[in-house]
Amino acid sequence: MKPVKVAIIAGEVSGDQLAADLIAALKDEMLKRSNQEIELLGVGGPGLIAQGLKPLFDYSELSIMGISAVLAKLPKLLWRIRQTANSIVDFDPDILIIVDSPDFTHRVAKIVHEKKPSIPIINYVCPTVWAWKPERAKKMRTYIDHILSILPFEPEVVEELSGPAISYIGHRLMENPSVKQSRDQQLARKLGSDKTILLLPGSRTSELNRNLETIKKSASEYLKLEPDTKFILPTIARFEERLRDELKSWPFEVKLVVGEADKWQAFSQADAALAVSGTILLELAIARVPCISIYRIDVMLKQLHKKLDLWSAALPNWIVDYQAVPEFFDDFAQPGVLARHLYRLSNDTLQRSAMLEAFDLVHERMSVDRPPSEHGAEIVINHLK
C-alpha cells in the first residue's frame, strides 16, 4: 500500500522530542493496522530527522525568545511561514501535525487550511489560552481538528472557552526513567546538615544574561545561612564554555554538570532549587525537589505582561490550582528574600512539607495509564484524511 503522508512542524528542542515520539508510535501502529509506512515532510530537529524527516530548513531559526528578538527576525520568519505552508499544500498530506511554537505553527496551519481545507490538522501541545488571549481557543475551531494536551487542566479550560476537541494524553516527563529514578531517590532520602542546592539559570542566552547575577547573589546570601552547602548548576552543552568561564569569578565553588543524565542525578541529590521560570519547574515538581522561581522579563514584554490574565507562570501551580511554588519577578527577586525562602525549603519545615504535598498532587494529576505517544498516535489515525 502507498505510504501515509504526514506533514509535521516542530519548532524547538522539546517539540522535536514530542514529535519524534509521536511519529515513532504512529509508524508502529500503522504497520500493525495496515502494513503502511509513513512519509514525512516539514520542519524539525534531530528527533524527527532520525524518524526520516528531511527538514525544509534548520528549525533552530524558530527558537526565538522575547519580543525584541522576534521583531528583529520578523521578515525572515514571515517568509518561512509562507514557504512551509506552500510546501505542505504541494505535498498534500493525509494529515498535518503542528507541535508547540504557536506563533509559527498556527500561522502555517491557517494558510494550509485556507488553501486545502480537506487536510486534517492536529495540534500537539495546547497554546497557553489559559494565560494569554483566551479568545484564541474559539478561533482555533476553524482550522484545528483536535488538540493533544500535555497538561491535565487544559481540557476543562479549552472546553469552557469553546475551543476545538481536546484530549489530555499525558506528558513525556512522566515516562522518563531518569525522572522516575530521581523521584524515587527523593522519596527515600533524608535531609542532612550539609545542603545541596540546584542553581538553574535557564536554557536560553537571554535568560542567562538576565538572571545569572541574581542567582549568584542569592547563593552568596544562602551561604551565610548554611555555610556547608554544595551548589550544582546543570546546563546544556552550548552553554558549558561560557558558564565555566563565568563561574571562575564567583566567590564560592559551583559544580557545573552537563547533559540530561547528570542533570537528573543532581535532581536526586538536591535539597532545594533556585530556578528561572519555565518547564524546569514542572521537572522539579515531578522529581520532588522544592523550589522557588525567578524571572527578569524582556523590556518590551513587560508592557504585554500587564495585560496577561496570569495569576501564575509556574506550571505546578496551575496543575494544583494554588500558589505552591513561590514566584519572584524583576525587582521582587531580591537575593536576601530568595536565600531565606531557599533556607526554609531546604530544611524540615512546614513550607517544605506543604510544597512536597503539592508536588505529589502534581504527580497524581499528571499520571496516565499508557504512554502519551501511543494515545496521540491513536487520535492521529482516527483523523487521517
Image (tube, grey):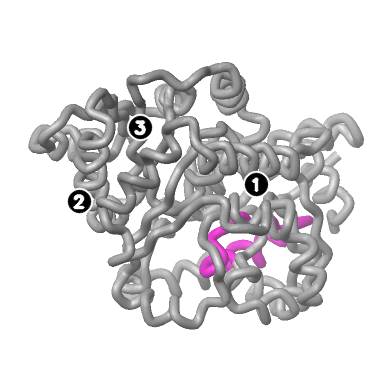
Task: Tell whether 100 sits left or right of 371.
Answer: left
Residue 194 visible here: yes
Tell me where residue 78 appears, x and y as whole percent: 45, 74
Which residue shows up at 28% across the image and 25% down it? 230
**Is 39 situated above or below 57?**
above
Q: Give the residue pinned by disc 2.
A: 213
Q: Does label 2 or label 1 sit earlier along the sequence? A: 1
Q: Residues within 10 Å of mark 3 (few under 14, many from 20)?
A: many
Which amino acid does the dot numbered 2 rest on? Glu
The residues tagged by marks 2 and 1 sit, at their Cα atoms, a distance apart of: 44 Å
Q: Name the residue tied to disc 1.
A: 40
Of residues 150 and 131, the one nearer the viewer is 131
Above or below, 105 against 149 in this view is below
* Residue at point 36%, 67% (across, down): 66
Please state the horizontal and vertical placement of residue 34, each as a whole percent of the image. Answer: 90, 36
Residue at figure coordinates x 62%, y 65% from the top left: 127
| Closer to viewer: mark 2 or mark 1 | 2
Q: Disc 1 or 3, which lies upstream in sequence?
A: 1
Disc 3 designates what residue?
197
Is residue 284 visible in this depiction of the protein?
no
Under circle 2, the secondary element is: helix
Callout 3 secondary element? strand
Residue at the spot 73% in from the left edge and 50% down from the top edge: 5
| Quadrant in which the C terminus appears | bottom right
Bounds of the magenta span? 85-105
In three-dimensional space, the C-alpha distance between marks 1 and 3, rounded to whole angstroms, equals 44 Å
